[in-house]
């Protein structure tokens, strides 16, 4: 059996072809294209679908896939981007990326219409923002009512690709909480929000569990793909949650961290009870009775990129790493990584970044250390926030570009005081999606039963005891409290 794992990412579309032992046979990718006009960010849904098919064909060609094999296509990726289609399943307007900000006023209108604590308890999201399909639909109802009048279904981007593959309008459950239209605790659409956004329940896709097989391909699509004995389509799950499976971090007590431009955190909870004080969003897990908590902090890798571009131009990341490893960092300045405002676990949109304790003796290497440590402090703040709300984190599994630096990985382990694992798996979401497909096919017993499958190697960083780390973290939290009024 062959598995084509499709990742509909924000920046790139990727396809990885695996065999049933989860050995990757081929990988292809291509950039996602957008039309941008100020706050508007649109894409062509049909071009996206055609690109997906092209990447599948390229994978098959690279791996010399045989038509004697059964094949499965499983889809992961982003959630919120909106596609509105007619009764023939064709887009009635360009797709609206989650980055599209035209509905900021409508998001505020939703906040004023619905009590935010009630909305949090229902939707799983702490606030109404322009990201969500709900606010975009409200904008369409107010500014382009004829579009909705001629629409048959309202889909998120992954739903649209599944529709084009199979002819079935289905919404995979783990992505529904990113719509602001879904009652996460009751596992159904929220009637009042749906009506307020100008649509009907019948326009929304049928909800199916994550990792479900939904059938074969439409004949028109079969003719466009490499020959195989059969094709089966699996709905997969959200990319962040698939990455948890793909890195063996879909287990309680482990925090899955995506260390890219931003820091995102995902954690499984099998005994979840709503806690309005914990501002992490909550979502249906990948199996019955499970909840995944998710939150995202803006001050991650973007802080180091800012430093390298503006304070240390001309220095490579490797050069910085070598100099950092050779120096004693006692007395280095502190850095508050709030260049884009303050997000989890402390919230303050007007917060700003800062270096504290600067002296004439400090140079760019000291400042580079401070930036890396500041992001590590942000990571620990979120680990502590999970612990403060009854979820003890005993280990971290991290992926993304920020894990390329061994020095930074060890620093994060030391500051956080927990084991820090970095799998050598560049396409963790695709690997996790393939695991879901294998479980649905009965090749493995469950999505955590992967011992018989090919596994990527990983680097493990264990925290080194150092009382100075705790002292500096306490100073960091004190500074956050004094400057921005956040909890200590």
Image (cartoon, rainbow, N blue to C red):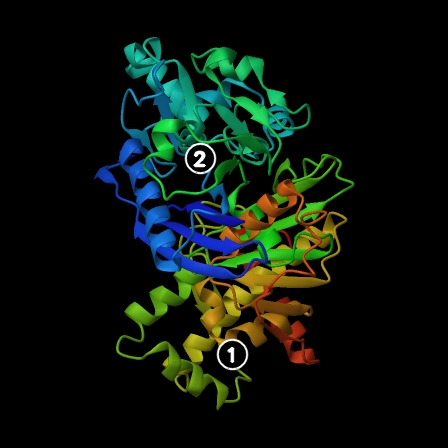
**Where residue 254 appears, x then y in whole percent?**
69, 57
Position above or below: 461 against 168: below
Q: CA distance from mark 2 to mark 1?
A: 37 Å
Quadrant location, the C terminus: bottom right
Q: Mark yes or no: residue 41 visible.
A: no
Task: Please name the residue that numbered disc 2 is placed on.
Answer: 158
Q: Is residue 303 left or right of residue 327?
A: left
Q: In the image, which disc is placed on residue 407?
A: 1
Q: Earlier in the sequence, mark 2 or mark 1?
A: 2
Q: Is residue 13 left or right of residue 410?
A: left
| Rendered image quadrant of residue 88 | top left
| Rendered image quadrant of residue 395 | bottom right
Secondary structure state at the residue bearing disc 1: helix
Q: Mark yes or no: residue 367 visible.
A: yes
**Where residue 326 appears, x then y in whole percent?**
48, 91
| Rendered image quadrant of residue 278 | top right
**Where residue 228 appears, x then y in whole percent?**
44, 43
Mark 2, mark 1: which one is toward the viewer? Answer: 2
**Where residue 243 appears, x then y in whole percent?**
55, 52
Q: Residues within 10 Å of mark 2 (few under 14, many from 20)?
A: many
């Amino acid at each position: 059996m062959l598995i084509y794992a499709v990742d509909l990412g924000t920046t790139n579309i990727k396809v990885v072809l695996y065999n049933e032992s989860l050995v990757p046979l081929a990988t292809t990718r291509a950039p996602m294209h957008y039309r941008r006009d100020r706050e508007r960010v649109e894409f062509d849904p049909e071009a996206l679908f055609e690109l997906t098919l092209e990447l599948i064909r390229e994978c098959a060609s690279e791996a010399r896939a045989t038509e004697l094999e059964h094949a499965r296509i499983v889809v992961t990726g982003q959630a919120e981007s909106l596609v509105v289609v007619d009764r023939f399943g064709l887009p009635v307007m360009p797709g609206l990326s989650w980055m599209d900000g035209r509905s900021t006023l409508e998001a505020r209108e939703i906040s004023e219409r619905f009590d935010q604590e009630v909305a949090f308890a229902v939707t799983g999201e702490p606030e109404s923002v322009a990201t969500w399909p709900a606010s975009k639909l409200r904008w369409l109802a107010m500014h382009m009512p004829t579009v909705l009048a001629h629409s048959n279904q309202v889909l998120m981007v992954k739903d649209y690709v599944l529709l084009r593959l199979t002819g079935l309008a289905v919404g995979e459950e783990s992505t529904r909480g990113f719509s602001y239209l879904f009652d996460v605790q009751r596992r159904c659409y929220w009637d009042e929000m749906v009506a307020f956004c100008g649509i009907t329940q019948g326009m929304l896709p049928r909800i199916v569990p994550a990792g479900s097989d939904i059938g074969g391909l439409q004949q028109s699509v079969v003719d466009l793909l490499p020959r195989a004995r059969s094709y089966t389509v699996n709905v997969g799950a959200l990319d962040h949650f698939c990455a948890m499976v793909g890195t063996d971090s879909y287990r309680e007590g482990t925090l899955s961290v995506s260390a890219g431009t931003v820091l995102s955190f995902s954690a499984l909870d099998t005994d979840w009870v709503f806690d309005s004080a914990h501002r992490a969003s909550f979502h249906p897990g990948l199996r019955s009775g499970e909840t995944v908590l998710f939150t995202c902090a803006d001050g991650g890798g973007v802080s180091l990129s800012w430093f390298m571009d503006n304070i240390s131009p001309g220095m490579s990341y490797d050069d910085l790493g070598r100099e950092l490893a050779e120096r004693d960092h006692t007395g280095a300045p502190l850095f508050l990584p709030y260049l884009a405002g303050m997000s989890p676990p402390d919230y303050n949109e007007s917060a700003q970044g800062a270096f504290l304790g600067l002296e004439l003796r400090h140079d760019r290497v000291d400042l580079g250390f401070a930036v890396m440590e500041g992001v590590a402090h942000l990571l620990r703040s979120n680990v502590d926030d999970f612990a403060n709300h009854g979820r003890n984190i005993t280990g971290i599994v991290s992926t993304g570009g920020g894990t390329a630096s061994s020095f930074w990985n060890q620093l994060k382990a030391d500051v956080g005081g927990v084991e820090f694992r970095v799998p050598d798996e560049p396409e963790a979401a695709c690997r996790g999606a393939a695991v879901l497909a294998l479980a649905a096919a009965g090749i493995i017993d469950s999505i955590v039963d992967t011992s018989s499958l090919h596994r990527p190697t990983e680097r493990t960083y264990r925290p080194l005891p150092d009382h100075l780390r705790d002292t500096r973290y306490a100073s960091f939290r004190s500074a956050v409290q004094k400057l921005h009024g956040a909890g200590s």
